[in-house]
Image: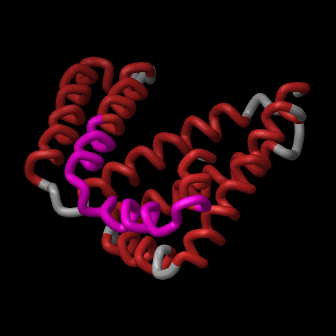
Amino acid sequence: MGLPQIYGLLKPAAFAAGVRKFPRSLPCGVGLMLLGTVWFVWNLNLESISDFAAWKPVLLAGFAGVGVASCIYVQDFLAVRGLAVVLLLLAKLMVDTARWAQTDWRLVVVTWAYVLVIAGIWFTIWPWHLRDLLNWATADEKRVRIGSAIRLAFGLFVAVLGVTIFRAA
């Protein structure tokens, strides 16, 4: 999480130009959508669904097909939609991982996960809102630097929690 933010602090104009291209980036979209598809199918394969055990191979193939077909037939804002899928899956992983922590600091990670869920749902339904948000956040170098600094500080905060509080838990 920190490396892109450091780049945003050092070269805000180049960072902003790259960020503005993201929502319509087909290579990023295909990569994120395929990552999300593989991750979702893998999670589904690990689930024990006794009611649907006979249908599990069909479901796995169907969801994999939907993910691949999305890359071919739904290319408009594919990067945003792929990011939304990955955000939802990442949030699941974060909440599942935070369950073991015996400290209230885990709520930082859980709250962050729920923010990702809301963002994932929001950007799935209205992908152009991410484009608008990114355009607003990169309107000038000051906004880029402030946003990058805030995200870098949060990333460092979570990293410090990871090596201190969560390590001891």
For the question of whether residue 102 can be seen, the reply is: no
Residue 1 position, x and y percent, is: 59, 46
The image quarter containing residue 24 is bottom left
The image quarter containing residue 144 is bottom right
- Residues rendered magenta in the picture: 9-34
The image quarter containing residue 64 is top left
Q: Residue at x 18, y 62 (%)?
A: 76
For the question of whether residue 134 can be seen, the reply is: yes
Please tell me whether residue 19 belongs to the stretch shown in magenta.
Answer: yes
52 above or below 24? above
145 above or below 59? below
Q: Residue at x 24, y 30 (%)?
A: 59
Which residue appears farthest toward the front when viewing the image? Answer: 10
Compared across the picture, whether 50 is left or right of 72 comes to right
Per the picture, the main secondary structure of the magenta-coloured stretch is: helix
Q: Residue at x 28, y 40 (%)?
A: 31
Q: Nearer the viewer, residue 132 or 96?
A: 132
Compared across the picture, whether 126 is left or right of 66 comes to right
Residue 21 position, x and y percent, is: 31, 63
78 above or below 62? below
Q: Nearer the viewer, residue 102 or 116?
A: 116
Compared across the picture, whether 73 is left or right of 10 comes to left
Q: Residue at x 36, y 71 (%)?
A: 131
Compared across the picture, whether 149 is left or right of 18 comes to right
* Quarter placement of the C terminus: top right
Please tell me whether residue 71 belongs to the stretch shown in magenta.
Answer: no
